[in-house]
Image (tube, rainbow, N blue to C red):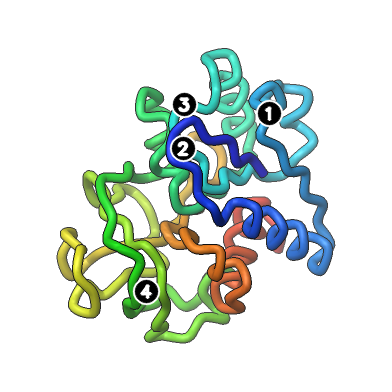
Amino acid sequence: MFSRTTGYRHASIAAGVTAVEVLGAVNNFAVDATEDPTAFTDSNLARFAAVLFLNTTGDVLDGTQQAAFERYVRAGHGFVGVHSASDTEYGWPWYHALLGATFDSHSTIRLATVIVVDTAQPATRALPSPWVRTDEWYNFRAQPAGVSVLVRVDEATYAGGNMGADHPISWQHAYDGGRAWYTAMGHTACSYSERPFLDHLLGGIEWAAGIP
């Protein structure tokens, strides 16, 4: 789990790190949390089934570290992106193709209604639909291409959306030999004590890691 920031830093990072560590302890997988980019080497990454970018921002890896991460994904491993993972590494096109979309803007923190699109996936099976919750709602530069959308947000239920009726906020796909899962939710510290959001995040981690 990687949470380095070189731009805006979310106050919720500490809560997110703790939450993922607890999810691992309860669900029998190990979690190694770091903000050290030198962890991105071939030998170190090979220890993990998936890498999670938790509210990263800005340029967080150098070229050598980026190349190691690309090799890691191409070897069949998984990636999980949470919230501002899409506000990260704007000069790295491969990363944004892996992620599926690029952050453009966001609403204020507000209540909105979430609709589950695919109820059969690990990240959505336990979710209510409609699901009314508070977060900061992201708009993207374009609709994600070549992905399976899991969850969308209903723009009629809040102000600040600009993507229309089909406004995805979570999706997954196979990419370049590996697996990538993303959720745009997770701005607030409260998210990481919210049972449905934790179920959503756990399902994404397990899917990306290839845990049946």
On residue 36, which mark appears? 1
Whole-number angstrom distance, CA of label 4 to CA of label 3: 32 Å
Whole-number angstrom distance, CA of label 3 to CA of label 1: 13 Å
Q: Quadrant of residue 20?
A: bottom right
- Say left or right for 200 vs 162: right
Q: Where does label 4 land, which residue? A: 117
Q: Nearer the viewer, mark 1 or mark 4?
A: 1
Q: Quadrant of residue 49?
A: top right
Q: Position of residue 9 (x, y in %)?
A: 50, 43
Whole-number angstrom distance, CA of label 2 to CA of label 3: 7 Å
Q: Quadrant of residue 110?
A: bottom left
* Classed neighbour count for the residue bearing mark 3: other residues with Cα under 10 Å, few (<14), some (14–19), many (≥20): some
Whole-number angstrom distance, CA of label 2 to CA of label 4: 28 Å
Label 3 near label 4: C-beta < 8 Å? Answer: no
Q: Position of residue 106 (x, y in %)?
A: 28, 55
**Mark closest to the chain's N terminus, 1 or 2:** 1
